[in-house]
Every structure is written in structure tokens, then in C-alpha cells.
Amino acid sequence: MLIGIALLAPTAAHAAVVISEVAWMGTSVSANAEWIELQNTGSENVSLAGWVLTSATGAPNIGLTGSIAGGGYYLLERTSDASVPSVTADQIEANIVRCPDQ
């Protein structure tokens, strides 16, 4: 009699969040039309609880909220949800993009 034992390892879901776009110059409509877009290149949802976006100088320092669906995007807009009219912002933050002279 031959007895076989199989070890089944769970497959790990890959979740990678990248900064996919930074719009820091505004638009012809408004200098405040600025945003940062994050992309989840993985297949699983990623909770942003405890995540912080910060620069090398420490300012701005933005605590993120919500989550990004697998393969999805997260839009962080400055001052209002009017920066990207065709997409609803996931978060509004007044100081997301700042030039050194601001």
C-alpha cells in the first residue's frame, strides 16, 4: 500500500501600489486642479489604513483612507472634486502637491 502526502501551500496574492500619475501644474481652468493617482497593479484589494504619502522633506504628510480594488485606481485630488471632472475623487486633500516656492 502506497500512502502519499501532499502539502498544499496557499497561493499568495500580489498587491503592489504605485504612484501612476502626478498632476502638479493645474489646468487652464484652475491652478488648484492638481491630483495624485495611485494604481493597484495586483489582483487583491489593498486597504490604505495606516498608509501615509510624504515627501523627502516630510511635507506634505497625508494619511490615506479607504482601499484600492485589485487592478483599480485611487484618486487623491487637491481642494475639490472638480480637478478630474469625469472621475470621483477617493480623497480630497488641500496640500497634496506643493512646489518649493508655495
Image: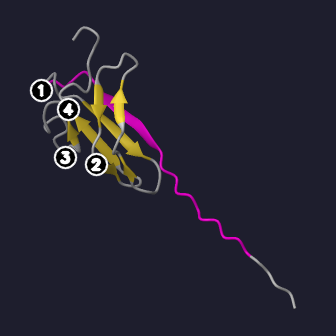
Sequence-wise first label, 2 or 4: 2
Name the residue tied to disc 1.
29
- Residue extending farthest to the right is 1
Instruction: Residue type at mark 1: give it.
Output: Val
65 is higher (above) or lower (below) than 53: below
Sequence-wise first label, 2 or 3: 2
Instruction: Residue type at mark 4: give it.
Output: Glu
Residue 4 in the figure: left or right of residue 54 = right
Sequence-wise first label, 1 or 2: 1
Name the residue tied to disc 3.
88
Sequence-wise first label, 1 or 4: 1
Separation of marks 1 and 2 at Cα, in angstroms: 29 Å
Image color mode: secondary structure
Where does residue 53 sit, x and y in percent of width and height? 35, 31
Q: Which of marks 3 and 4 is in front?
A: 4
Snapshot quadrant of residue 11: bottom right
The residue at 17%/34% (across/down) is 83
Snapshot quadrant of residue 85: top left
Name the residue tied to disc 4.
93
Instruction: Residue type at mark 3: give it.
Output: Thr
Quadrant location, the C terminus: top left
Separation of marks 2 and 4 at Cα, in angstroms: 14 Å
Sequence-wise first label, 3 or 4: 3
The residue at 28%/23% (across/down) is 60
The residue at 25%/27% (across/down) is 96
Separation of marks 2 and 3 at Cα, in angstroms: 14 Å
Separation of marks 3 and 1 at Cα, in angstroms: 18 Å
In magenta, the rendered stretch is 6-29
User: How many neighbours does mark 2 have within 10 angstroms: few (below 14), some (14-19), or many (20 or more)?
Assistant: few
